[in-house]
Image: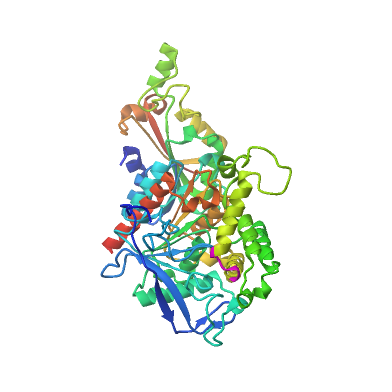
Amino acid sequence: MRDDLALISRWIPRGARVLDLGCGDGDLLAHLQDDRQVNGYGLEIDQDNIAACFAKGVNVIEQDLDKGLGNFQSDRFDYVVMTQALQAVLRPDSILDEMLRVGREAIITFPNFGHWRVRSYLGFKGRMPVSSALPYEWYDTPNIHLCTVKDFEAHCRERNIRIIERQVVNRHHRSGRLTRAWPNLFGEIAIYRVTL
Amino acid sequence: MPETIPQDSVGLVQPQTLHVDRPLELECGRVLPSYDLVYETYGTLNADASNAVLICHALSGHHHAAGYHSADDPRPGWWDSCIGPGKPIDTNRFFVVCPNNLGGCHGSSGPGSQNPETGQLWGPDFPMMTVKDWVKSQAQLADALGIRRWAAVVGGSLGGMQALQWSMDFPDRLANAVVIAAAPKLSAQNIAFNEVARQSILTDPNFHGGRYYLHDTYPRQGLILARMVGHITYLSDDAMRMKFGRDLRSGRFHFGFDVEFQVESYLRHQGETFSRNFDANTYLLMTKALDYFDPARECDGTLEDALADTRCNFLVMSFNSDWRFSPERSREIVNALVQVGRNVSYAEIDTPKGHDAFLLPIPEYRKLFGAYMGRVAEATSNA
């Protein structure tokens, strides 16, 4: 399993009700089902991924996140998870609101655009940053709403969203002295647990 | 039959008949004292009878879902695209059972069969059947075959409604319900199309109040019209445009009412073929069963209430060009199941083929269907 998914799964207690937005091939939910007996559903639009979820016995619903979560009732879930998709949706602010409407807590991960390598790519090369966390060219990137750790936290303050837990890690999903001291400069992936 | 039977066909098959002497109490209040169910099976039932899959047919379907009846059979069963060795419903792994529903016209008791109490043909006196009644009769078939619990109950359109009804009426007797191109109830528009079909049969002078058998005739024109209007709703606008466009049979206008456009020719052909092979009373009865289906109403509540006691896993699939039972209707089922915490998965297949797509060998559809059924088979062998 991906390291960020392992980090997230530690936050989810046994028997929780989980919605995973952009669940991919269902790895996180399969793990949570086996290990924590969660009642989980994934949302996904890629049919290869959907077939992979079927084969794993993971509940998956074909649904486009940009059309919102209006089909789910408020407080239906304990945790709504979205890994590495916030930057790819049309309106990250509305999806965040929706996550906190249908779930008690939201768990979100995104690539930190404030990382020093990204800054220097733009600053020194004058080109749009391309890296292992952001492997696309400017014209074909699905990442249309990139943000930094500071941007995200400012948005949470504005909307009165409370940050329960934060992990900012390097590309190997480890945190060290640097990522703890200057997360917006040395963190490559930001992982948040938030609530209203 | 083709020159050689394809590798992925179940091959030559034969229908069987179950005679049930136990009376069947029907939703309409009447009782069917005894009845016949004709059915086919494919594959082998395993030792603990845990690999059985029930196929429920749609409006004009029957028990012959896969394989060929004889060497001269020009076409295989109606769902041969999905049932067979290596196909989504893999007969190497599953024992597949497909009955003809009561009220049908392909061998099971229906308007065209004999009323045992009078010795006459039932005709219009055959009791009105509902989806619930069919499911009850299918449970009798399961008992007779020694199947306590289906690995899956599977159906498209009206068949999907039966799969859904199974999950509510016999929650412990199925592990999975596969509901394809269905709806939790018909819309006013759906009922309206059915009513046009019924009126065209009922007003045919050869209908004789449903006793056309006694007059040695049948409401041919009514059946043709009914099928023509039905067929339009099975195809999408795009599918018709791609298939026929505005093509003319002779290349020019004749300024008359004979067949000119290819689409007219096609519809008339479909209608005529259908009218020769289908019973008018059965068609009336089947469309009413569709109209009556409404599990939420049955429990005086919401769809969530109706599904609250279900226990099986669900797979719901729809087709984006289906306007008869559109994806939105399937999503109503999915949302209700999520709300009551049931295991449910949903996929929407991208195809221009319309409602009929559920019968067709569409690669994405077969891949997803197969992936799900593969998991069902694994769970069966581990049980």
A138 inside magenta stretch: no
Q: Quadrant of residue A91?
A: top right
Q: Position of residue A53 (x, y in %)?
A: 37, 48
**Observer-nearest residue: B266 or A8?**
B266
Q: Position of residue A122 (x, y in %)?
A: 44, 16
Q: Is residue A158 visible?
A: yes
Split into 4 quadrants, where in the image is the N terminus of chain B? bottom left
Q: Is residue A32 visible?
A: no
B279 inside magenta stretch: yes
**Observer-nearest residue: A174 or A54?**
A54
What secondary structure is the magenta-colored segment mainly?
Answer: helix
Q: Which residues are magenta?
A: B277-281
The structure's colour scheme is rainbow
Q: Position of residue B300 (x, y in %)?
A: 61, 70
Q: Residue furthest right?
A: B255
The residue that appears at 68% across and 75% down in the rendered structure is B209
Q: Residue furthest bottom?
A: B117
Split into 4 quadrants, where in the image is the C terminus of chain B? bottom left
Q: Position of residue A52 (x, y in %)?
A: 36, 46
In the image, residue A29 sits, relative to residue B194, either above or below, namely above
| Tag count | 0
**Observer-nearest residue: B278 or B382?**
B278
In the image, residue B197 sits, relative to residue B356, either above or below, namely below
The residue that appears at 27% across and 67% down in the rendered structure is B46
In the image, residue A190 sits, relative to residue B313, either above or below, namely above
